[in-house]
Amino acid sequence: DGGITQSPKYLFRKEGQNVTLSCEQNLNHDAMYWYRQDPGQGLRLIYYSQIVNDFQKGDIAEGYSVSREKKESFPLTVTSAQKNPTAFYLCASSLDPGTNSPLHFGNGTRLTVT
Amino acid sequence: SQKIEQNSEALNIQEGKTATLTCNYTNYSPAYLQWYRQDPGRGPVFLLLIRENEKEKRKERLKVTFDTTLKQSLFHITASQPADSATYLCALDNYGQNFVFGPGTRLSVLP
């Protein structure tokens, strides 16, 4: 079955530690995205990548970093510089880097930093 | 400033009735608009896409309209069922680069 796999589902970290969230897709999609979701707010774009070895900042990139070394993988690192990292993180992909293709989402990673 | 609003945070309707959800936007000129369903603790699932030159799109019990003059999309679920209870998100094309999402409306269909 094709899809997007995010792991782990729940992640706990101490303040000051960097943490990397995994996102893998086997849909052969070119574009991949990271969104953050907080209660009562829409999804906010952190980073997106339209092609391997290239990525762009979204609206809230500060304190986050990404890499896109392989088409299938788009890991997100939440650094200690991110002031409020506790949130639900969603990874998505789309066939076409433009906006006429639907987004396919993983089931998210809930990160709690204490 | 740019803004996307969805009519209410929560909407309760009786089973069998038509649910109507609203997505309003300002300072965007989307070429596409999409609707997604999200269940608790899960990622959103794509439902429908409508283009700026399309007035209406249907899929089974779902209907979406897109009025670029009013800067509004309406999402209808006819003959609603308790299984339709979820949060529904609209997403606007952001100048062809990515999508921006509204805050969502939590729909509860009461038996």
Image (cartoon, coloured by chain):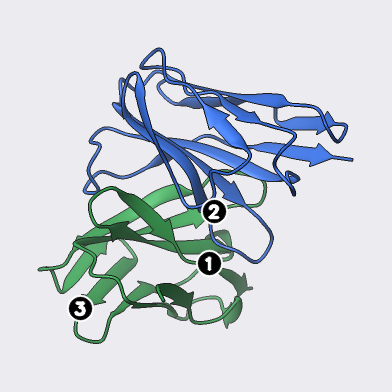
Chain colours: A blue, B green
Relative placement, left or right, of B61 versus A106 is left
Whole-percent x and y of residue B14?
Answer: 57, 81
Q: CA distance from mark 2 to mark 1?
A: 9 Å
Q: Say the numbered circle drawn on residue B38.
A: 2
Question: Which one is closest to the eye, mark 3 or mark 1?
Answer: 3
Number of the front mark, 2 or 1: 1
**N-term-proximal mark, 3 vs 1:** 3
Q: Amino acid at mark 2?
A: Gln
* Residue placed most toward the observer, B31 or B11: B31
Residue B104 circle label: 1
The answer to the question of whether label 2 and label 1 lie on touching residues, with beta carbons closer than 8 A, is yes
How far is mark 3 from mark 1, CA to CA? 20 Å
User: How far across and how far down the image is residue B80, in percent?
Assistant: 47, 71
Tell me the SS state at disc 3. Answer: loop
* Location of residue B3 with respect to A84 vertically, above or below: below
Q: Residue furthest left?
A: B53
Residue B78 visible in the displayed image: no
Query: Which residue is denoted by mark 3 in the rendering?
Result: B68
Q: Is residue B55 visible?
A: yes
Q: Amino acid at mark 3?
A: Thr
Distance between the alpha carbons at the discs numbered 2 and 3: 25 Å
- On what subunit does the disc labeled 1 rest? B
Chain letter of disc 3? B
Q: Name which residue lies at 62% across and 41% down.
A: A89
Location of residue A110 in the rendering, given as x and y in whole percent from the top left corner = 72, 39
